[in-house]
Amino acid sequence: MVSIQPLLELQKIDTALLQLSHRQVNLEERAVLTKAKSDLLATQNEHATLTTQLAATKTQITNLEAANKKCEAQIAKYSQQLKTVIAPREAEALQHEIETVRTERSTNDDQELQLLETSERLEAQLSDIVDKNNAGVAAVASATTALSEAIKSCEAEKKSFDGQRQDVAVAIDLKLIKLYDNKRNKRTTPAVADLHGSKCQSCHLDLSVVELSALKKLGAEEVAECPNCDCYLVV
Ligand SMILES: [Zn+2]
């Protein structure tokens, strides 16, 4: 039976490399960054909505103030006219006009008061949102740094494994490497495994006594394979 013991070391490194690449894809830091970015986006949307609402409120206040200036001018004009009219019906009509405009002005004042309260509330909310936004920007920045450091550390680990792999591979017969590569390309589970007791360490199934003794009887040029998962077995 051909000894494939050296391939086992190679397989261990390849398994570690596979686990590493899986870890790199599923880094916790990546999820944290995604969450921080989506939180920040929500805050920015909230900020935009509040800004729009505040601008609309301020426009309404400006319009009401302009309307009240008109009211004041009208009241002044009618009061002036009132001083010069003689006919009582005309005076009555003017007084009625003045009363109407005063009511309008008073309604506008009430409305403006409400809008001023709204505007103050929106400004307070905006100030909170600005703080929240600053915190969000900082959170995204620190999550970005954390992710890039985690990736860097994975890459350093990969480099070290790659180096180990090269050292191990260079000492193995090319024919064995070829066998290993062919087997590896056809599967996702380990291509080479050893037995723990009668258990194959690739498929974790037990080999029967008959199967085990058959492996021991293999010819000098034959490579042992697991009868369950077909991987090469170090016996
Ligand atoms: Zn197996």
Image (spheres, grey):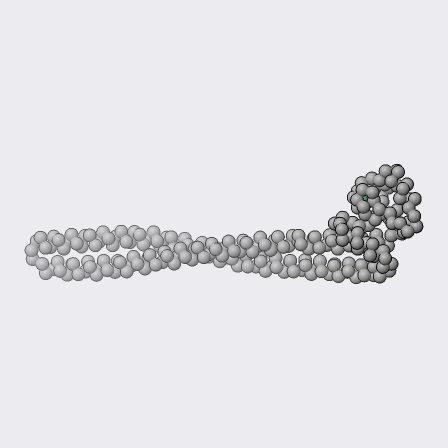
Image coordinates of residue 47 in percent, x first then y, are: 46, 56
Seen in the picture, residue 231 relative to 169 is either above or below; the reply is above
In this view, which residue lies farthest toward the left?
Answer: 87
Identify the residue shown where x is 12% and y is 58%. Answer: 82
Q: How many marks?
A: 0
Image coordinates of residue 127 in percent, x first then y, are: 46, 57
Identify the residue shown where x is 16% and y is 58%. Answer: 78
Left or right, 232 with reference to 118: right
Q: Is residue 16 visible?
A: no
Identify the residue shown where x is 87% and y is 58%. Answer: 173
Q: Is residue 227 visible?
A: yes
Question: Relative to the observer, which residue lies in front, 26 or 66?
Answer: 26
Left or right, 219 with reference to 90: right
Image coordinates of residue 49 in percent, x first then y, are: 44, 55
Q: Quadrant of residue 80?
A: bottom left
Question: Relative to the observer, which residue lies in front, 79 or 52?
Answer: 52
In this view, which residue lies farthest toward the top?
Answer: 209
Identify the residue shown where x is 71% and y is 58%. Answer: 154
